[in-house]
Amino acid sequence: MSKIRLLKTLKGMYGVVVKVYVDTEYGEYQVRIDGSPDATYHTDGRNDALNTAEVMRADAEINARLANADMVDAQLARMLDAEESRSQADDDELRVSRMLDAAYIAH
């Protein structure tokens, strides 16, 4: 039976967590990104595992930052669309008001 223990936890921005485990029975290190079970790196070198964990944390942070930026872009686009719709409605209301004024004056 393999004995796996946590060696190190790296926490990044946007909730990124990368953990380095050591399997003492097989002399293997595993680097895992929390929430991504398929993103596991296996090595027999301690330094390799720790360095890879730093790279994986940085990469996961970049991906999380890009995803966050995409969400902000989508929110801004929705806000601009809403503002444009309000502006168009204001323009329409002003045109109707002017037409009514002109009709009243002409009458």
Image: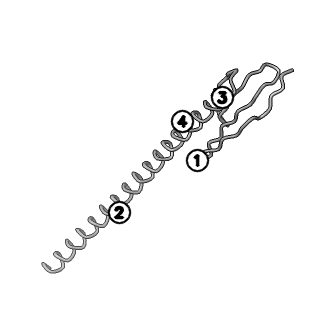
Tell me: 83 left or right of 65. left
Tell me: 24 left or right of 59. right
Residue 100 sits above or below residue 14 on the image? below
Q: Nearer the viewer, residue 15 or 7?
A: 7
Circle 2/circle 3 CB separation < 8 Å:
no
Assess disc 1: are there few (<14), some (14-19) or many (≥20) residues with their C-alpha within 10 Å of its C-alpha. Answer: few
Q: Which residue is mark 2?
A: 86
Q: Which residue is mark 3?
A: 47
Residue 94 placement: quadrant:
bottom left
Q: CA distance from mark 4 to mark 3?
A: 18 Å
Instruction: Say which residue appears at 29% left-offset and 61% top-offset.
Output: 88
Instruction: Say which residue appears at 60% left-offset and 36% top-offset.
Output: 54
Residue 100 sits above or below residue 70 on the image? below
Circle 3/circle 1 CB separation < 8 Å:
no
Q: CA distance from mark 4 to mark 2?
A: 41 Å
**Mark in front: 4 vs 2:** 4
Q: Nearer the viewer, residue 85 or 68?
A: 68
Amino acid bearing label 4: Asp
Secondary structure under the numbered disc 4 in the rendered image: helix
Q: CA distance from mark 2 to mark 1?
A: 37 Å
**Mark in front: 2 vs 1:** 1
